Image (cartoon, coloured by chain):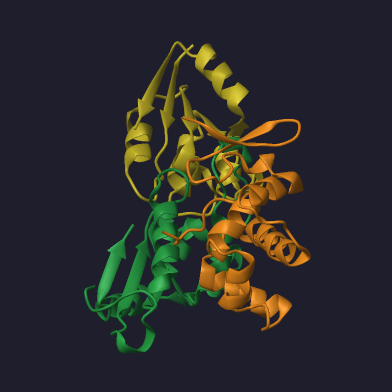
């Protein structure tokens, strides 16, 4: 990342960063950590995409109510990603189907892609970060 | 090592950077006291930003980064307010950081 | 009374619940908490395994963990019982020991 700096804008090379979310929220800290890294990284003006596969799709489930487990409900923050110019959210179709979920069950609009398409997209990235 | 902000009738705990430990402790008096400690008297223009931040946090559970704040303020209150010059005049220590502190929110994610 | 088994991992991600079901005996209690609550939902790839187990074992789900993840008791496999923290304590007291499948 030596040639990219926050706020420099035009001259820096834009890289493709993909964040791959594979864990359910709350049971582990991965989902929240990923979200924070994404929000912080948004200042660097890179080409960012978020992918939700496996139990990671549960991060986007509507209706999360965490007051009785004493943890912060961070699911509304996914709806703020657009304000951070992060518009590319992909969900794997196979992961949704395995969990009996449909795009309507999710709290943000996403693009649903099959594993094969998603695999191609992953290969095109400069950096893939897994959580 | 606990810091606090002294109000008329009680003290509220803040962290080492001056942000509220418990968001529920916030009221307008907290904001006024924090600002007074920085020698700032809050005007309607300050409150407009503070209230905007509180609404944003209630909706998204995140304190917006400075450029998100600037853009969103511009969208809501017009371009003459949605620019960093205007916001820095109101909050010289950094609009997102300082206004979030007065608003009783955590330090914005992405501000160092 | 018998043994209470607890497990906290999603069966769609690890095989802990599967091992728990394979090695537990009819009549025991199994409490699903944290990410294991996904295992009690009726329309996932893991549903059939749990529905089968529910025929001769008592399956419990910790309600606060279910709500945190955005699901309601109506979305659970038939025969699964939702308990709150007080119910969790009662279950522990009712069984003569607790075995955790972590």
Looking at the image, residue A107 lies above or below residue C90: below
Question: Is residue A119 visible in the rendered structure shown here?
Answer: yes
| Residue C47 in picture, x, y percent from top left | 48, 48
Task: State the residue lying farthest toward the bottom.
Answer: A10
Chain that appears green: A
| Residue A113 in picture, x, y percent from top left | 42, 76
Looking at the image, residue B79 lies above or below residue C76: below
Q: Does residue C43 appear to the left or right of B30 in the view shown?
A: left
Looking at the image, residue C33 lies above or below residue A122: above
| Residue C33 in picture, x, y percent from top left | 48, 35
Task: State the residue lying farthest toward the front.
Answer: B39
Residue A14 quadrant: bottom left
Front-most of B97 and A121? B97
Q: Does residue A86 appear to the left or right of A122 in the view shown?
A: right
Chain that appears orange: B
Front-most of A34 and B90? B90
Q: Quadrant of the C terminus of chain B?
A: bottom left
Looking at the image, residue C24 lies above or below residue B29: above
Front-most of B13 and C48? B13
Residue B42 quadrant: bottom right
Question: Is residue B62 visible in the rendered structure shown here?
Answer: no
Give chain C's shade.
yellow
Residue at horizontal 52 percent and vertical 73 percent from the top: B67
Labels in figure, total: 0
| Residue A36 in picture, x, y percent from top left | 43, 58
Residue at horizontal 45 percent and vertical 64 percent from the top: A39
Task: State the residue lying farthest toward the left.
Answer: A2
């Amino acid at each position: 990342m030596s040639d990219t700096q926050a706020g420099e804008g035009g001259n820096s090379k834009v890289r493709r960063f993909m964040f791959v979310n594979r864990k359910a929220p709350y049971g582990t800290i991965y989902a929240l950590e990923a979200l924070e890294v994404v929000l912080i990284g948004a200042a660097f003006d890179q080409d960012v995409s978020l992918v939700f596969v496996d139990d990671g799709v549960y991060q986007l489930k509507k209706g999360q109510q965490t007051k009785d487990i004493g943890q912060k409900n961070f699911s509304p923050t996914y709806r703020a990603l657009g304000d951070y110019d992060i518009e590319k959210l992909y969900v794997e179709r196979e992961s949704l189907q395995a969990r009996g979920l449909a795009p309507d069950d999710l709290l943000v609009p996403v693009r649903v892609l099959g594993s094969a398409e998603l695999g191609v997209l992953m290969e095109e990235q400069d950096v893939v970060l897994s959580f | 090592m606990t810091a606090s902000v002294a109000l008329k009738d009680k003290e509220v705990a803040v962290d080492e950077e001056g942000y509220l430990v418990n968001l529920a402790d916030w009221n307008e008096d907290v904001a006024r006291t924090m600002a007074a400690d920085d020698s700032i008297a809050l005007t309607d223009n300050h409150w407009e930003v503070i209230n905007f931040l509180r609404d944003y946090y209630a909706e998204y559970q995140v304190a917006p980064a400075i450029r998100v704040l600037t853009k969103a303020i511009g969208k809501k209150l017009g371009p003459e307010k949605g620019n960093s010059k205007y916001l820095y005049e109101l909050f010289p220590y950094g609009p997102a950081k300082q206004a979030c502190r007065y608003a009783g929110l955590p330090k914005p994610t992405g501000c160092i | 009374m018998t043994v209470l088994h607890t497990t906290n991992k999603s069966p769609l991600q690890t095989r802990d619940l599967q091992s728990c079901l394979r090695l537990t005996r009819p009549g025991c209690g199994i409490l699903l908490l944290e990410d294991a609550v996904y295992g009690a939902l009726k329309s996932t790839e893991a549903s059939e395994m749990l529905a089968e187990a529910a025929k001769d074992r008592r399956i419990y789900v910790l309600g606060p963990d279910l709500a945190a993840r955005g699901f309601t008791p109506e979305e659970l496999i038939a025969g699964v019982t939702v308990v709150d923290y007080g119910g969790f304590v009662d279950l522990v007291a009712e069984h003569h020991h607790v075995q955790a499948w972590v």
